[in-house]
Image (tube, grey):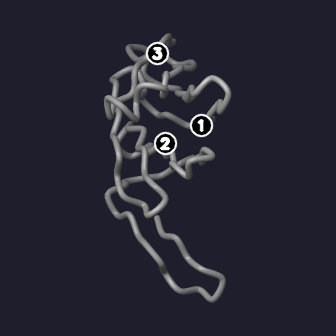
Amino acid sequence: MSEIDGDGTVLSTFTDVKSPHHLCIDSDCRIFVADLGSDHILMLNSELQLIETYCEIQLAEATRVCYNELKSQLYVIHSSHEQSLMSGMTIFNLQQAVKKNNLTALAGH
């Protein structure tokens, strides 16, 4: 993943991602990436530096991420072709993520 300016110059790069599938950006310029290759949700800052990595076995194949600014919640849509893993949506409360540097699952499946 790279940030490129209007002239095509690479400004910053984040290489510790296996298969980025979907991303969203909040008003604080945090970037949330659904990485299919690692089944992780990555939180990066605007300079593409890793803030937090979140992984949960039930989050296999996280395919979409959406940030609700008003509620400070990150919605993660995940699916799985394996019957032992859950498909659905997990909601993470990010209000405490800045203070605690982690994501707290509120509900999911």
Which percent across, then down, holds residue 108?
50, 13
Residue at the spot x=43%, y=73% of the render? 12
Out of 45 and 22, give the one closest to the viewer.
45
Location of residue 13 by image quarter: bottom left
The residues tagged by marks 2 and 1 sit, at their Cα atoms, a distance apart of 6 Å
Q: Which SS class for mark 2?
A: strand
The answer to which of marks 3 and 2 sits earlier in the sequence is 2
Q: Is residue 7 above or below residue 66?
A: below
- The residue positioned 63% from the left and 23% from the top of the image is 71
Q: Residues within 10 Å of mark 3 (few under 14, many from 20)?
A: some
Whether residues under marks 2 and 1 lie with C-beta atoms below 8 angstroms apart, the answer is yes
Residue 30, image x, y percentages: 51, 48
- Look at label 3 and name its amino acid: Met
Residue placed under numbered mark 1 in the picture? 64
Q: Quadrant of residue 63?
A: top right
Q: Residue at x 34, y 25 (%)?
A: 56
**Residue 86: mark in rendering:** 3
Which percent across, then down, holds residue 6?
Answer: 66, 83
33 vs 53, left or right, is right
Q: Nearer the viewer, residue 33 or 27?
A: 27
